[in-house]
Amino acid sequence: MIKSATAIAAVLVFAAPALAEDWDFILVNNTGKTIKTVEVSPGGAGTWVANKIDTELTKEAKSVKPNGKMTVHFDKGGGCRYDLKATFDDGSSAVWSAINVCDNAYVTVNYANGTPTFKAS
């Protein structure tokens, strides 16, 4: 019985770090500017975490040109609504709030009358 309890405890210790899940979605850039960096935060938290990009990619592959696409990888810590922050090659940035990453695989970011808007599908 003691061996079983020890085995169960060991499984629980090793399973604990697996609580954060790797998630991703396809970002489509319709802003008219090149996106230099992408960060994700749980909705409203403001705790920005950089997109997990393969370190072997070239600098050009890490950015998203206008009308381009990129896969955004992040740890889903809980909930479905996330904010997305993009920093552009001109140094400006924009935030798109409350994107439902649970039900949508594609997120298209753009501007409507100067306001950041998105379409998720």
Image: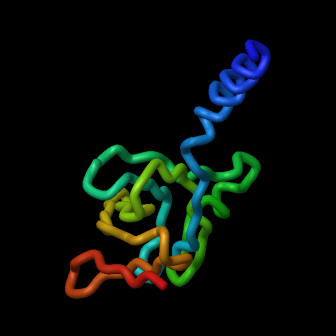
Q: Is residue 6 above or below residue 29?
A: above
Residue drawn at x 47%, y 68% as measured from the top left: 101
Q: Is residue 56 above or below residue 104?
A: above
- Front residue of 42/89: it is 42
Residue drawn at x 65%, y 34% as measured from the top left: 15
- Front residue of 86/19: it is 19
Residue 73 image offset from top left, x and y in percent: 59, 57
Q: Which quarter of the figure is the N terminus placed in?
A: top right
- Give the quarter of the image for residue 117: bottom left
Q: Is residue 120 left or right of residue 64?
A: left
Q: Is residue 45 left or right of residue 82?
A: left
Q: Is residue 15 left or right of residue 99?
A: right
Residue 100 image offset from top left, x and y in percent: 40, 71
- Front residue of 44/9: it is 9
Q: Is residue 76 above or below residue 19?
A: below
Is residue 64 in sight in this rendering? yes
- Farthest front residue? 1
Residue 52 image offset from top left, x and y in percent: 60, 50
Residue drawn at x 49%, y 48% as measured from the top left: 50
Is residue 90 in sight in this rendering? no
Residue drawn at x 28%, y 49% as measured from the top left: 45
- Front residue of 76/35: it is 76
- Farthest top residue? 2
Q: How is the image coloured?
A: rainbow
Q: How many marks?
A: 0
Residue 87 image offset from top left, x and y in percent: 40, 59
